[in-house]
Image (cartoon, rainbow, N blue to C red):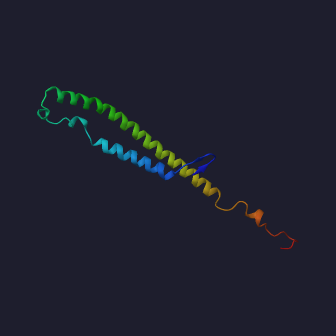
Amino acid sequence: MDGNGFHVEIELLEKASRNMAELVEGQDNSELSELPGDSQAYGHADLPAALTEFCDRWSVGLDALCDRATRMGYSLGEAAKAYREADQAGADALSTDPGIDVVEPMPMPGMGP
């Protein structure tokens, strides 16, 4: 869609919206609390506790990022929808050429072709 001083690739907005949804979906199935694993694999008692604390804190941040990504994806999709509707409204308004009667006027009685 083109306008005064802008150009919008509606398909790219739609793709970005889908990509955001896929990104969030991928994170929904991933739990950081499961990352530390077996504490005996670390060799030092403080390491698993530190990693667990880090994962717990980062999980909160990741949830916030996913919430924002969800909202952003929704907004991108709604913007694409609005542009598509505007394009369709323009196409509907111009389903026939409004200048055709000026270029090819209808015959007037008493006048030659």
Quarter residue 27 falls in? top left
| Count of picture labels | 0
Residue at the spot x=28%, y=29% of the render? Answer: 57
Q: Which residue occupies the foreground of this view, 88 or 66? A: 66
Report the side of 39 relative to 73 (left or right): left
Residue at the spot x=25%, y=29% of the render? Answer: 54
In the rendered image, the vertical position of residue 79 relative to residue 56, given as above or below: below
- Residue 47, percent from left and from top: 18, 28
Quarter residue 26 falls in? top left
Q: Seen from this angle, which residue lies furthest bottom?
A: 113
Residue at the spot x=26%, y=41% of the render? Answer: 30
- Residue 73, percent from left and from top: 43, 43
- Residue 85, percent from left and from top: 55, 51
Q: Which residue occupies the foreground of this view, 102 or 39? A: 39
Q: Which residue occupies the foreground of this view, 44 or 61? A: 44
Report the side of 96 relative to 36 (left or right): right
Q: Seen from this angle, which residue lies furthest front?
A: 43
Quarter of the figure with the C terminus? bottom right
Q: Which residue occupies the foreground of this view, 68 or 37? A: 37
Q: Seen from this angle, which residue lies furthest right?
A: 110
Report the side of 100 relative to 51 (left or right): right
